[in-house]
């Protein structure tokens, strides 16, 4: 039996050094489809959605609201189904 693929959700480059995690739109255990809006981050003057990088289940999250972030930061993990 093979292990399912795990995909890390990472913060994309948003052109700002100041990025703050806002909220999760899904909970651990929820099924997501690649491209779905799953989280939200803030930069001064704008809000950005973070899309699911793969179809599967959100199995873990690494950040809480108001956490400062840097580009490429790991936000959570999706296990592909």
Image: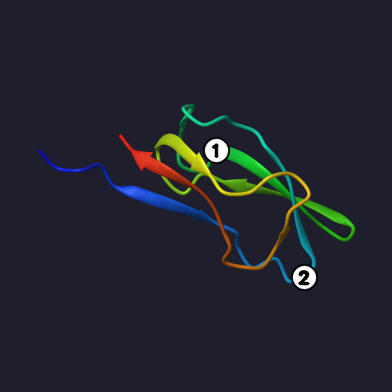
Q: Taking 13 as reference, is 30 above or below it? A: above
Q: Nearer the viewer, residue 24 or 52?
A: 24
| Quadrant position of residue 26 | top right
Query: What's the residue at 41%, 45% (across, down)?
Result: 54
| Quadrant position of residue 65 | top right
The residue that label 2 is drawn on is 16
Instruction: Indicate which disc residue 36 carries.
Output: 1
The quarter of the picture where the N terminus appears is top left
| Quadrant position of residue 38 | top right
Q: Taking 36 as reference, is 10 above or below it? A: below
Q: Taking 18 as reference, is 38 above or below it? A: above
Q: Nearer the viewer, residue 13 or 69?
A: 69
Query: What's the residue at 34%, 48% (across, down)?
Result: 6
Query: What's the residue at 14%, 42% (across, down)?
Result: 2
Disc on the earlier residue, 1 or 2? 2
Measured from the top left, where is residue 43 in percent x and y? 81, 59
Query: What's the residue at 77%, 72% (across, down)?
Result: 17
């Amino acid at each position: 039996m093979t292990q399912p693929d795990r995909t890390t959700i990472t913060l994309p480059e948003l052109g700002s050094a100041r990025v703050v995690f806002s909220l999760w739109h899904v909970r651990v255990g929820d099924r997501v489809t690649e491209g779905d809006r799953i989280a939200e981050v803030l930069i001064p003057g704008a809000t950005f959605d973070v899309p699911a990088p793969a179809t599967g289940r959100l199995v873990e999250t690494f950040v809480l609201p108001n956490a400062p972030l840097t580009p490429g930061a790991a936000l959570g993990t999706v296990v592909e189904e």
